[in-house]
Amino acid sequence: MAETMHKGSCHCGKVRYEVTMDLDRPVLACNCSICQRKGTLLGFVPADAFRLLSGKDDVTDYQFGTRNIHHLFCSTCGGTSFATGTAP
């Protein structure tokens, strides 16, 4: 599958985004305590492949451990849609 644009959001729809990625690429089952509890699978894209459409002021940032990842979630519904990080 080629890279395609996909749309996503939190549960209530306040935080909306578009991301261009190939869904056939491998994902990572993160072993941190947050992702393990949620069963999160992570797909990585460069920053220019992601565009936040709405909700910039509606996300809350949570960091822990090495603080390399910004776990962003909707401050209204608590839905986690994406994260940003400093690692490659």
Image: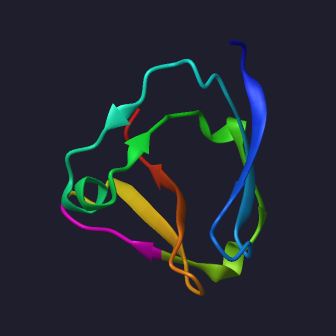
How many numbered circles does the render carry? 0
Q: Position of residue 63 (x, y in %)?
A: 32, 68
Residue 79 highlighted magenta (yes or no)? no
Identity of the residue drawn at 51% across and 71% down: 73
Image spot of residue 1 (x, y percent):
68, 12
Q: Residue 11 at x, y = what percent?
A: 63, 71
Identify which residue is drawn at 21% across, 57% down: 66
- At a point 74% along the width and 72% down the height, the residue shown is 13
The x, y position of residue 72, in whole percent, is 50, 67
Quarter occupied by residue 5: top right
Magenta highlight: main SS = loop
| Apparent side of residue 86 relative to residue 36 in the rendered image (left or right) | right
Write down the region rendered in magenta.
61-65
**Quarter-wise, where is residue 62 in the image?**
bottom left
Does residue 1 lie above or below 64 as drawn? above
Q: Is residue 63 above or below residue 20?
A: below
* Residue lying at the far bottom of the rendered structure: 76
